[in-house]
Amino acid sequence: MKIGILRETKTPPDRRVPFTPGQISQLKKCYGTMDIVLQPSEIRCYSDKEYYEAGLMLRDNLSECDILMGIKEVELDTLIPGKTYLFFSHTAKKQPHNRKLLQEIAARKITLIDYEYLINQNNIRLVAFGRWAGIVGAYNGLRAYGERYRIYKLKPAYQCFDYEEVKKELHKVRLPSIKILITGGGRVAGGAMELLKPLNIREVNPEEFLKKDFGEPVICRIDPWYYVRRKDGHPFDLQHFFEHPDMYESIFKPYTKVTDFYIACHYWDPRSPGFMTPTDMREPDFRIMIIADISCDIHGPIPSTIRASSIEQPFYGYFPWTEKETTPFDLRSITVMAVDNLPGELPRDASEDFGKMLADKVIPALAGNDEEEVIGRATIIRNGELTERFRYLQGFLDGKE
């Protein structure tokens, strides 16, 4: 097996990589018949020199490779017919901006394996950047709080060399007696909680959070059963919620009256109820003034997320009475952080974590017989044809929907 590591071509550029130099060296030792080469790149978080010094081959032409791996979508004119590609394609939810990508992959008889759908038999994702989205998103939220109220100033995460430097920046944080709320219970929420842990903020349960006042900053993380309920009055069931989100209604509103700083880490289905409405945000006792929307569903469950922000310009303001964007730290408005590629701010750490998951969970299936169908479940197109699992994309692929 010969694997080629692609240079990233999407704009804005992404500096993450599937594997670090050390991980590639280890893979070559573990799999004696595996060869891995890289396209040179000036933007990777690990330099060409670091790969070269690890004894790895760099080559522009990857046409001899069987499998080509990247992170983000691949430029259409660089796709090599008949090859197998692994990257985040953002096509399986019928994203209109990537229809041409899917069509070109089919036309060139390519096999597309999407990282997002690499799952085990229990539908648990095997590789993801969620932890790093949570870490960077929570950090950006702290940045926003400090700058809005002019009490401290943190160095942007993307200007830090790595996570260790980010954690050193946390020593500058000084929070008053505020209430911080996190929604979600997966990798993203875990990453947010991990980032906040060094601040030694007291964690309280939902009932305390809603009913008590504290003389110190506190944090509360809530799962879906605290912010939605079944419309038919039956007890909450998580699997039922995942399958039938339209049968639920929001009970989040009480949290808007007591929360100062909200970090959104939940997964949201478009059929699910919103967390709040524009009208809720205009009520006199609406209290949330900082929203770090890591989930970043545009025009979704949080009305203030009217667009994605960028790594370089992560904040904007939202004025509830006009429902329009304002300057980031206008004290009459809500400060919003809605960066949609947060792990890219700490690319070295995020890549190392991602590469370890790939090496442990995916490469064995790719190099072996894939008895558990790990690769099969994540294959959207095989040799130019949609697989059975993704047959629902046929109309989208044909341009009919």
Image (tube, helix red, strand yellow):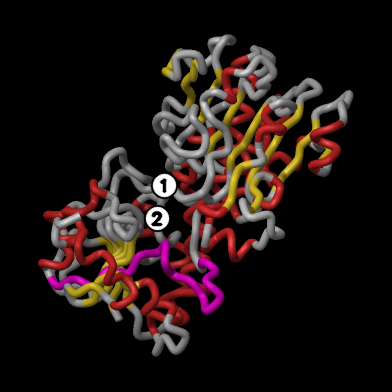
Quadrant (top left/top right/bottom left/bottom right) for the N terminus? bottom left
Q: Is residue 225 above or below residue 260?
A: below
- Given residues 229 and 195, the one toward you in this image is 229
Rate crowding at label 1 as few (under 14), some (14 to 19) or many (20 or more) other CA atoms within 10 Å: many
Residue 401 percent location from the top left of the image = 20, 55
Between 107 and 229, which is closer to the camera in this rendering?
229
Q: Is residue 79 left or right of residue 360?
A: left
**Residue 146 covered by magenta stretch:** no
Return the residue at label 2: 17
Instruction: List the residue tagged with mark 1.
Output: 45
In this picture, which residue range is highlighted in magenta?
109-125
Residue 245 is situated, as x and y percent measured from the top left of the image, at: 53, 55
For the residue marked with disc 1, what is the amino acid? Cys
At x 51%, y 57%, the residue is: 352
For the point 14% across and 61% down, the residue is 398
Q: What is the number of callouts on the image? A: 2
